[in-house]
Image (cartoon, grey):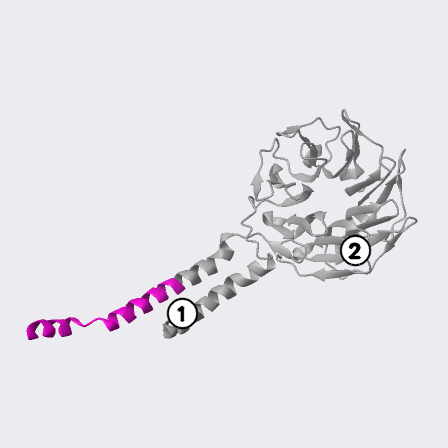
Amino acid sequence: MRNLIIKASPLFVIALLCIGPPIANAESTLSNWTSPTTEILFSASMVNATDGWAVGWNGTIIRWNGTEWNTVASPTTNSLYSVFMISTTKGWAVGGSGKIIRWSGTLWNTVASPTTNSLYSLFMINASEGWAVGWNGAIIRWNGTKWNTVTSPTTNPLESVFMTSASDGWAVGWDGTIIHWNGTVWMTVASPTTNSLYSAFMVNATNGWAVGIDGTIIHWNGTEWNAVASPTTNYLESVFMTSASDGWAVGGSGNIFHWNGTKWSNVTSPTTSWLLSISMVSADDGWAVGYDGVIIRWNGKGWVPEFPAIILMPLLISLTLFASTLAKIVLKKREDQLPSKRTAQTTLEMW
């Protein structure tokens, strides 16, 4: 028996090596969620740990139910570039050619749009007030009844909008464009960069961030925007802050960066696919989505990829080989202990 274990143990070790890292990285929780799409996912918005959404190319809509991501019926084939959930029963998404859709708690419906410009970002202050921005500097506003166009101080495409209140908000875009809402009008604000900015996130009225091409990172201190040292020259597509001392940025080639209150640092990523959006539930739970339908999750200790069959395959193969080899060894041992046909025949003849 001891020899049997020694012979079989190498395969058992292989099995452990194949499955060990994914399990350890997932904190011993075998989540079997996978992405239900290979379409590009442009935006994610998490309501809580058990409810979240992502939208993307060709009108793709998927939803997280706490266990798995599933495709949801979409009322459009226009690409959806931004989704913002107010609650589990209220939410919006915007996209190509000014497309606007609304979540009723049961299904998504198309809503009349005042623009044909593509809309790239959406922010809802509450159920009766929200903003969306996009191509040609387009700005539209929700008043609780309908969306209306609002005068814009720029014709540069606006990639991201973030409101801290009904009277304070920001939008950023191409060529370092930064504009500010003061409760009455949108005005251009001095920018420390000419690099295009793709995402903005405000911790509060006096603390905010924006990121963009070539690893650009800028910070709002309540008075002005300033460039901040960046650990990358890769594109940064999305930024999300959970507090003044904790935040994330994601972008090209699957790069992920973390803000610890002092500096931005690179964090190990489980993917090389471009990440286009990040949405955190808390400091210990969050999601990022991007090209090829990639979805990854932060568990408080590391970013974990989906757990598809390809990860389980090495384990299944190793365990199958282990079981097969074990069976052969046991069978061989039993055969060695049994009399051979010749021995059996001789024994019968002797009797």
Q: Quadrant of residue 107?
A: top right
Task: Find the magenta span and give its range.
Answer: 322-351
Could you say where residue 259 lies in the image, as x and y percent from the top left? 77, 57
Residue 334 placement: quadrant: bottom left
Q: Residues within 10 Å of mark 1 (few under 14, many from 20)?
A: some
Q: How many numbered marks appear?
A: 2
Locate residue 125, reporting x and y percent: 79, 35
Residue 330 appears in the picture as rendered: yes
Q: Is residue 232 shown to the viewer in this render?
A: no
Secondary structure at numbered mark 1: helix
Residue 128: percent from left, percent from top:
78, 29
Horizontal arrangement in the rendering, residue 39 relative to residue 141 (left or right): left
Q: In this picture, is 211 found above or below 183?
A: below
Considering depth in this image, is 232 or 327 the residue closer to the camera? 327
Q: Residue 27 in the image: x percent, y percent?
A: 60, 57
The residue wearing badge 1 is 8
Q: Residue lying at the far right in this picture: please name it.
A: 223
Between 333 and 59, the residue placed more toward the observer is 333
Answer left or right for 329 relative to 198.
Answer: left
Which residue type carries mark 2?
Thr
Reading the image, the residue beneath label 2 is 216
- Decide whether the magenta segment is chiefly helix, strand or loop: helix
Q: Amino acid at mark 1?
A: Ala
